[in-house]
Image: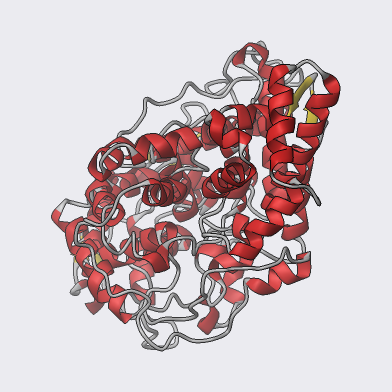
């Protein structure tokens, strides 16, 4: 496939401007819109006339409670639960960030759950078995399902969100590399360094077999250096382009730098037996590599299998590398518009912090997630959820129960179903559309708005409608759905029994923006169509008095399903 098909876009579309592009106000609705109306609410063509936020990276010292804790966890986890938010709200900001930045133990590898893969028994891992094309499809499905399971089962660590960040940054496509063992090793590498050192991760991913195969480094020879990885290393992974200064040259690197980098990177191949990258001296270009003025006219002499590290050291010595990385982190965690004020007050000081900490990412994340800027009201509820955030967040926040590990086939089957659901929403775990990652994170001027369109919005609504339905989704003898009664039983008794408190509690959990009075009235009418408030209290108490009475149970379930279905249909539900 053409991994750089995105370059066919106009240059203005590809640019990642420092100045403001489009500022969208927070979405608010007074009446539940139809699907096309929901889409239109994500479009606003007005340009900002002043900075979005004047706040910088000074430590946030404002009020700390449920709203701030929910904002932090929504951005750092795939759908925080009510218990997780309440726990965070009861602690200090520093304590919560400490926990988020604590890397969990590496998970056990994916397992074979398919009768098709006869290389190992079901319930055992295939990650070190010899490659076999016959088993590749089953193994790749196992890997994707396992990866989804890490998202669904995450605790309170930021590690999984950052693993996905690095996957979108150091892109490979599982379908292209055609070796699930390589894919697993790549996933493990991203997770290992998710909260660690960016330069170390860059070094290791450069010679990882998945990347060597994906960007054709394994085909590079001394006399025919392949430029694919060298180009992406500069343009997408580290220093970035900067303004165009010639037909093929940019401020931060030139075409000559791409060619020099390609020569540096020659000699590396992938070994399908050891599942590793390895160096072959006879394939390495031993000439002295000359770089342009963008790299201070540096040269790299022949260093054999250590030469690629010298290239990465040269790249990370450039001031723009830290800024480029911090902009990507900002767009991942805060918002896509980086205006001049944000560049000066947030990006540049974060970049200096990154360099001062030798490219360890944790201090930068700690500062950003603890900053005045992060908790500025304009940065709360302004991000459109990705399909993964939307789908996994629904499962986690509404306490959906998945099959236990004792039933691996059913467990992996449900994770596989979630992957198919996010795929039709245009985000397939393990397969970004090209080497630049998912366009919602880089394509101007829409950015996150690209997640909502005439194809994806109905898919989102269909998914939540299925999960809130009586039957839910069944596969391999197992079932997943939103158990509305269990959800309400997890709330304080007084909250569960009062319709207005109940609606407010659920809205606080599911929606990052305060609803209007009209919206709250509409939700009350949905729960109690044409009935006074006390009717809910009576019906709920009657159910509690006789929970096995099918008539009473059905009465409260029907009302709760209608309420949650309506809440998940609001435009605000698509925001984080």
* Residue drawn where x is 77% and y is 64% of the image: 35
Residue 446 seen in the figure: yes
Is residue 191 something one can see in this rendering?
Answer: no
22 vs 466, left or right, is left
The residue depicted at 65 percent of the width and 64 percent of the height is 518
Note whether 267 is above or below 246 in the view shown.
Answer: above
Front-lying residue, 342 or 522: 522
Vertical placement of residue 401 versus 334, above or below: above
Q: Estimate the x, y position of residue 417 in percent, counting from the top left.
A: 72, 36
- Image quadrant of residue 123? top right
Residue at image position (67%, 58%) is: 521
Q: Nearer the viewer, residue 421 or 381?
A: 381
Q: Nearer the viewer, residue 302 or 186?
A: 186
Determine whether 359 is above or below 104 in the image.
Answer: below
Residue lying at the far right of the rendered structure:
551
Say whether residue 487 is left or right of residue 51: right
Colour mapping used in the image:
secondary structure
Which quadrant of the view contains residue 478?
top right
Which residue is found at the position 58% from the left and 59% from the top?
434
Across and down, in percent, residue 526 comes to: 75, 51
**Quadrant in the picture for residue 44:** bottom right
Q: Position of residue 302 (x, y in %)?
A: 23, 54
x, y percentage for residue 258? Answer: 38, 68
Vertical position of residue 461 compared to residue 517: above or below? above
């Amino acid at each position: 496939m053409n991994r750089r098909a995105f370059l066919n876009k106009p240059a203005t579309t590809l640019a990642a401007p420092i100045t403001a592009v489009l500022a969208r106000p927070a979405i608010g609705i007074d009446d539940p819109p139809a699907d096309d109306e929901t889409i239109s609410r994500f479009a606003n063509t007005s340009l900002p006339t002043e900075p979005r936020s004047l706040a910088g990276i000074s430590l946030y010292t404002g009020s700390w409670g449920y709203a701030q804790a929910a904002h932090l966890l929504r951005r750092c986890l795939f759908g925080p639960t009510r218990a997780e938010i309440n726990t965070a709200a009861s602690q200090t900001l520093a304590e919560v960030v400490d926990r988020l930045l604590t890397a969990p133990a590496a998970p056990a590898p994916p397992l074979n759950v398919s009768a098709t893969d006869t290389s190992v028994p079901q319930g055992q891992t295939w990650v070190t078995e010899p490659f076999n094309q016959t088993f590749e499809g089953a193994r790749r499905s196992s890997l994707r399902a396992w990866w989804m399971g890490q998202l669904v089962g995450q605790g309170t660590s930021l590690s999984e969100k950052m693993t996905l960040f690095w996957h979108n940054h150091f892109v490979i496509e599982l379908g292209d590399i055609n070796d699930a063992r390589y894919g697993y090793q790549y996933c493990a590498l991203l997770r290992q360094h998710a909260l660690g050192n960016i330069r170390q991760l860059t070094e290791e991913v450069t010679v990882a077999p998945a990347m060597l195969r994906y960007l054709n480094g394994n085909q590079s020879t001394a006399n025919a250096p392949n430029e694919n990885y060298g180009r992406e290393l500069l343009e997408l992974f580290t220093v970035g382009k900067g303004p165009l200064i010639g037909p093929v040259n940019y401020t931060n690197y030139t075409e000559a730098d791409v060619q020099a980098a390609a020569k540096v990177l020659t000699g590396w191949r992938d070994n399908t037996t050891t599942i590793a990258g390895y160096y072959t001296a006879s394939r390495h270009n031993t000439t002295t590599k000359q770089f342009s003025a963008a790299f201070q006219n540096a040269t790299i002499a022949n260093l054999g299998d250590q030469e690629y590290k010298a290239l990465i050291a040269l790249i990370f010595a450039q001031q723009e590398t830290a800024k480029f990385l911090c902009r990507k982190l900002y767009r991942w965690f805060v918002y896509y518009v980086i205006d001049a004020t944000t560049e000066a007050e947030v990006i540049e000081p974060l970049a200096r912090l990154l360099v001062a900490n030798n490219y360890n990412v944790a201090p930068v994340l700690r500062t950003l997630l603890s900053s005045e800027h992060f908790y500025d009201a304009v940065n709360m509820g302004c991000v459109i959820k990705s399909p993964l955030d939307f789908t996994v967040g629904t499962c986690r926040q509404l306490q959906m129960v998945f099959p236990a590990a004792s039933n691996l086939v059913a467990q992996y089957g449900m994770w596989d179903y979630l992957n198919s659901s996010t795929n039709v929403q245009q985000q397939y775990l393990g397969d970004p559309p090209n080497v630049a990652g998912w366009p919602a994170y880089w394509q101007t001027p829409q950015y996150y708005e690209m997640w909502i369109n005439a194809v994806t919005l109905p898919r989102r609504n269909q998914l939540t409608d299925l999960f809130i339905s009586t039957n839910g989704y069944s596969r391999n003898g197992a079932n997943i759905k939103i158990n509305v009664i269990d959800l309400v039983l997890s709330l304080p008794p007084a909250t569960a029994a009062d319709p207005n408190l109940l609606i407010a509690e659920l809205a606080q959990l599911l929606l990052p923006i305060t609803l209007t009075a009209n919206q709250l009235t509409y939700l009350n009418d949905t729960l109690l169509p044409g009935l006074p408030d006390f009717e809910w209290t009576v019906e709920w108490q009657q159910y509690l008095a006789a929970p096995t009475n099918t008539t009473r149970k059905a009465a409260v379930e029907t009302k709760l399903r209608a309420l949650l279905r309506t809440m998940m249909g609001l435009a605000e539900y698509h925001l984080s």
